[in-house]
Amino acid sequence: MIPKYFLFRAWLYFAAALLIQVTLLPIIALDGIIPSLWIIVLFAFTISEGKMWGIINAAFFGFVYDLVTSNLIGSSMFAAATAIYIGGLFLNEQRNEQKLKSLSFLFILLLVSTVYSIIISLFTNLDIRSSLFTLLLNQGLYQGLYTTAIGSFVVIFNARRN
Amino acid sequence: MPRFFRVVWESYKEVISLILILIISLLLISQNNNRGIKRFRLFAFSSIAGVSSMLNSIFPSGATRAENEQLRRRNAELMMQVSISREYEAKNIQLQGLLQLRDTISFPVAPAKVAFRSVTNSQTTIVLDKGTNDNVQEGYIVVDERGLLGIVSEVSASYSIVRSIKNTSVNPIVRERKSGYQGILHWTGESFIVTNIPKTADTRVNDTIITAATSSLVNFPLPIGKVSRVINPEQGYMTTIEIIPFANIERADYVFILMQKPLPNFTITR
């Protein structure tokens, strides 16, 4: 069971993404909004390895991310697993690899990262004075859009490679 | 019966796995103040800080580092002296010169280097290269040369984790320097706001906000920031203001730890 869901290459990419996430990405933060690079890595691997792999690894990656960023432990685990599950609803059992070089990757990534950001903000910085609209827009959509913009490099890279 | 379970698992394995993960994560969230989890987090954070320090040491520093550190220490001391001087000045005016300002005030500050900084959308956490070996304790106040940066929340032998003011769980009582009216500082995830300031305070843009003596987190007058906007000038019974912090939370590489607790039995909770 474990070898099937443990992919060394994915953890290597995740470690690199995590390092960049906590050290370099804050420099390119736009108005305090930081893209979630590790979510891009997780979702890209979910496309190639399957929904089940994505959900289980979202939990592990989320746990490590919480530890490293001193977030509320369990919050990223919860948010990432839910977001990947929702994103997984748009994936087929086969022919998903094609998505890595298509626009649909970006649309689903936008959905995944927005859902992730909204759930995380509900756990970590829910401001009761904010309206639902503010929560969706400021805490979710902006970060989702920024993450998707960074994620577009994955599509460009895969399209060029093929 | 096993066949039934196998059929259910094959049909709903993703939903079942998701539900199990959500239950586990909710259990973990409820256990965040657990001592074991805290230790585990401290260990993980210290390891990352160690790696980060190693990476930093690869790039040699200039000869001016020692001098810079000295100057920064002096800056921090002066900032605190200025802050407390202004406090005395205000009291002086009130008491018509009855109070006398001491010429020199010495503060037990220790310089520290930022070993690692974790910045997420919701919070900024800093790891310093000083720990219990340097007598750092939980609850110590951390400043840079401009103002309050955060509070030491966890300490290991060589490292300490600082919960910066850019954290939803750090809410010190602050006050407007001139009027003295108090409010509570919040980090909303997007900006710093101070709530619960009475309407009579007449707070204006560019007024200075400092920590209040009644705060259990920081009971020492330290500069926090300047008022950038009054959010609800004509609504409600209390004013909410937005402030811009003085401290350089995302960029400060060298900071100072005020080596005294605000209260003897102080503990910080998540």
Image (cartoon, helix red, strand yellow):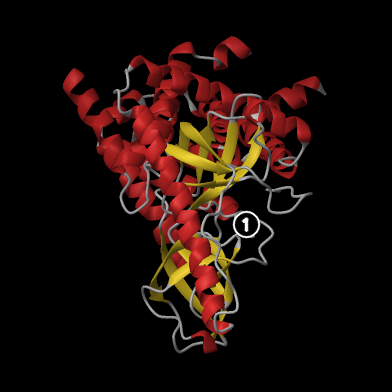
Expressed as whole percent of the image width and height from the top left, the position of residue A79 reads: 55, 43
Position above or below: B249 against A15: below
A148 left or right of B148 in image: left
Q: Nearer the viewer, residue B43 or B73?
A: B73
Name the amino acid type tagged 1. Answer: Val
Q: Nearer the viewer, residue B11 or A62?
A: A62
Expressed as whole percent of the image width and height from the top left, the position of residue A13 reads: 40, 20
Q: Nearer the viewer, residue B19 or A122?
A: A122
Expressed as whole percent of the image width and height from the top left, the position of residue B104 reads: 52, 55
Residue A135 seen in the figure: no
Q: Residues within 10 Å of mark 1 (few under 14, many from 20)?
A: many
Position above or below: A102 against B214: above
Residue B198 seen in the figure: yes
Subunit bearing disc 1: B
Instruction: Report which quarter residue B204 is drawn in.
Output: bottom left
Expressed as whole percent of the image width and height from the top left, the position of residue B123 reads: 50, 47
Residue at x-position 30% and y-position 28%: B64
Position above or below: B238 against A154: below
- Residue at the disc numbered 1: B218
B158 left or right of B65 in image: right
Instruction: Report which quarter residue B259 is drawn in.
Output: top right
Q: Nearer the viewer, residue A77 or B40?
A: B40
Find the residue positioned furthest to the left.
A160
Residue at x-position 54% and y-position 26%: A57
Which quadrant is home to the N terminus of chain B?
top right
Q: How many marks?
A: 1
Secondary structure state at the residue bearing disc 1? loop
